[in-house]
Amino acid sequence: MLTVEEALEAILSRVSVLGTERVEVVGALGRVLAAPVVSRREIPPWANSSMDGYAVRAEDTGGGAVLSVVGRVEAGALAARTIGRGEAMRIFTGAPLPAGADAVVPQEDVDANDGHIALRGRVDHAAYVRPRGEDVRVGDRVLEAGTLLTAAEVGLLATLGHAQVHVHRRPRVAILSTGNELADLGTEPGPAQIPNTNTYSLMAQVLEAGAEPLNLGVAPDRLEAIEERVRSASDADVLVSSAGVSVGELDLVREALTRAGAELHLWKVSMRPGKPITFGSLGSRHVFGLPGNPVSAMVTFELFVRPALFKMAGRRRLTRPRLRVRALEPVPNPGSRRGYLRVQLETTGQGLGARLTGEQGSAILRSMVAADGLAVVDPDTTIPVGGEVEVLILRELP
Ligand code: AMP
Ligand code: MG
């Protein structure tokens, strides 16, 4: 059986970054820049005031000087004239500094009356002035290819005049649930049926990973039916199925994938929950067969599909952050497979601590709902109270 690391390596070595497209700048949030951005602008474009006050010549401001106010300049306007010796100009935040001025005195630092201001002390050269190009210079390489775009980068791109941005394409991910027992959303489950969970949790995980889900619905446990659905997703980059990938007579997903033309690269990984998972190539598409139990499907998506989607989208950091925290109760992992146990995090006097979310059965979806992260525990190991436990973080910290 492969270790989680070996399986992930086998997957990532076969997955490559997708092509690029241009998207509108706000829509680029969460996407990865495909080309570096070099500024054609100076930001700010001219020296300007960072305060409401008076533009002055610093050299005129010694020992209780009185200056005459010769004009006014507001944000969005240019000063009508240059200021000369002994002169000042009323100025507002963001207004261009008038020619001749080299500093600003905040209005609260002067006594103003009758067209004059009396200064209370010396003003330093360049005080309260934001120089031209203080933030960005023409020719600055402000963003590198491969940058994950957050709100700050979106703001910078807009500042530099980019209404559209060149980014990597988002993976399109077709989701297929399999199983005779599944009643899909919108139909009331019959006597021996259960509701279809996985289509929806997996589609949501695809969205959370910044990719685009396509719903292929539910296929019954029949080879031809599964094969036909697999073939139908020809415009997807990735196909993710759930269930039917174990060793039972009705576990037909691997054979259906093979019949549809897929080459399967792995099966079975030493982990709990999970274990039966398959990954293969079908033309230019990648196919994942995840286990059917809702928690197993979500956890194997986290560990294998999400990093693959990130790599395709051009992201550099492919895995979730991990923290070492204190066990607030014993965290047992009996058995020979590595455990990924659902835990809740709590802030304690000694930093963050982890507590199991309760029953860890792979069909107990509420253990996932309650989980802030997955405690990664070696086989045949129980982490004692107060011991250090490594947690893969799934959501924002409490
Ligand atoms: P299987 O791998 O087909 O044996 O499925 C394992 C378990 O997961 C069974 O109890 C299935 O009923 C359940 N299961 C499979 N698919 C889904 C699904 N889409 N939603 C909820 N449970 C499922
Ligand atoms: Mg089944």
Image (cartoon, rainbow, N blue to C red):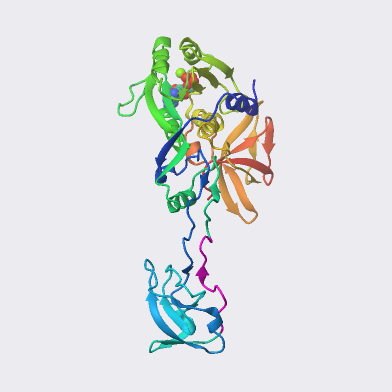
Residue 126's place in the image compared with 299, above or below, is: below
- The rendered magenta stretch, by its main secondary structure, is classed as loop
Is residue 186 or residue 168 the one in the foreground?
168
Residue 256 locus on image (x, y percent): 46, 12
Residue 140 locus on image (x, y percent): 55, 51
Residue 95 locus on image (x, y percent): 42, 69
Would you say residue 194 is visible in this rendering? no
Residue 304's place in the image compared with 276, above or below, is: below
Q: Quadrant of the N terminus?
A: top right
Q: Magenta stretch containing residue 126, yes or no?
A: yes
Is residue 79 or residue 126 the one in the foreground?
79
Would you say residue 83 is visible in this rendering? yes
Query: Which quadrant of the picture is home to ligand 1?
Result: top left
Position of residue 28 in the picture relative to residue 343 (left or right): left
User: Quarter-wise, where is residue 204 in the image?
Assistant: top left
Q: How many marks?
A: 0
Is residue 271 or residue 314 the one in the foreground?
314
Q: Which residues are magenta?
A: 122-134
User: Quarter-wise, where is residue 265 in the image?
Assistant: top right
Q: Magenta stretch containing residue 369, yes or no?
A: no
Residue 237 locus on image (x, y percent): 46, 25
Is residue 311 or residue 361 the one in the foreground?
311
